[in-house]
């Protein structure tokens, strides 16, 4: 068969067209070397995530910590003293101190009545501990027995805040109800009344070094309130 007859045959011509199309499609799939670019990864939505600038602005908008609020009038000597302590040691918090002072008041009175010097040691300054320890030792040698019950704390009032040297000092007036009596070695009542509740009012002064972290307040002085 010559070339003209070969190309004029419809069946042969159709086969050539189909073969050409198939070859072109195969070249499209296998014959191209360039790699298709991967689609870009999805970008995170940061619209709901605050930027550091936003956080810094919000922090700048926070009001300054008012350490004296609820305990002293503004610009009073007590308020200024509390603020001075907080300026020297940012760990100081008036509300936390007063809560712990009330708990310490009850703990110290109970420990002193029971002669528990080991419980008093971390709560008292050295000079105050010496006074308490001497009285405990005197009672023990004399055979005296302390009858004591802490009924309740009625009130605690912060009176004074000051800085002396490198120490902060806070003066608190406590009002409480107690049962307190002293008996001698034979059981005879020497002082107080073991069956009556008495109201007491005392002034306690707590001290703490300003460079301590955490701050460790200790009882430095005690006085009877008038």
Image (cartoon, helix red, strand yellow):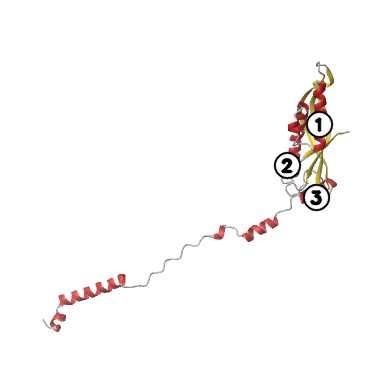
Could you classify mark 1 by the number of other residues whose Cα lies within 10 Å: few (under 14), some (14-19), or many (20 or more)?
Answer: some
Give the farthest residue toward the front. 141
Question: N-terminal of the two: label 2 or label 1?
Answer: 2
Could you classify mark 3 by the number of other residues whose Cα lies within 10 Å: few (under 14), some (14-19), or many (20 or more)?
Answer: some
Residue drawn 73% across the image and 32% down it: 119
Left or right of 29? Residue 145 is: right
Question: N-terminal of the two: label 2 or label 3?
Answer: 3
Question: N-terminal of the two: label 3 or label 1?
Answer: 3
Give the farthest residue toward the left. 1
* Image location of residue 144, percent across then percent down: 81, 21
Give the mark toward the camera: 3 or 1.
1
Q: Label 2: which residue?
A: 96
Give the farthest residue toward the right. 226
Identify the secondary structure beneath mark 1.
Answer: helix
Identify the secondary structure beneath mark 2.
Answer: helix
Could you classify mark 2 by the number of other residues whose Cα lies within 10 Å: few (under 14), some (14-19), or many (20 or more)?
Answer: few
CA–CA distance in space, label 2 to label 3: 17 Å
CA–CA distance in space, label 2 to label 1: 26 Å
Give the label on residue 195, or none: none
Quarter that holds the N terminus: bottom left
Residue drawn 79% across the image and 28% down it: 177
Identify the secondary structure beneath mark 3.
Answer: helix
Q: Are marks 2 and 1 in contact (CB under 8 Å)?
A: no
* Image location of residue 127, percent across then percent down: 82, 37
Q: Label 3: which residue?
A: 84
Where is 204 relative to 195, above or below?
Answer: below
Residue 205 lies in quadrant: top right
Quarter that holds the C terminus: top right
Residue 62 lies in quadrant: bottom right
**Front one among 112 and 75:** 112
Q: Label 1: which residue?
A: 132
């Amino acid at each position: 068969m010559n070339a003209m007859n070969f190309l004029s045959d419809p069946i042969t011509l159709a086969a050539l067209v189909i073969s050409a199309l198939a070859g072109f499609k195969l070249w499209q799939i296998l014959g191209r070397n360039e790699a298709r670019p991967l689609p870009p990864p999805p970008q995170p939505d940061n619209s709901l995530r605050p930027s550091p600038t936003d956080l810094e602005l919000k922090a700048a908008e926070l009001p300054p910590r008012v350490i004296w609020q609820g305990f002293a009038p503004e610009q009073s000597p007590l308020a200024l003293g509390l603020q001075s302590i907080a300026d020297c040691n940012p760990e100081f918090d008036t509300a936390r101190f007063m809560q712990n002072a009330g708990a310490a008041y009850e703990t110290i009175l109970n420990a002193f009545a029971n002669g528990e010097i080991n419980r008093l040691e971390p709560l008292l300054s050295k000079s105050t501990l010496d006074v308490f320890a001497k009285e405990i030792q005197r009672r023990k040698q004399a055979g005296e027995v302390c009858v004591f019950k802490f009924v309740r704390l009625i009130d605690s009032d912060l009176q004074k805040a000051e800085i002396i040297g490198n120490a902060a000092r806070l003066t608190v007036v406590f009002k409480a109800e107690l049962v307190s009596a002293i008996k001698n070695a034979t059981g005879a009542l020497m002082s107080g009344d073991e069956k009556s509740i008495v109201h007491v009012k005392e002034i306690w002064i707590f001290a703490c070094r300003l460079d301590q972290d955490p701050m460790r307040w200790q009882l430095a002085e005690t006085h009877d309130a008038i």
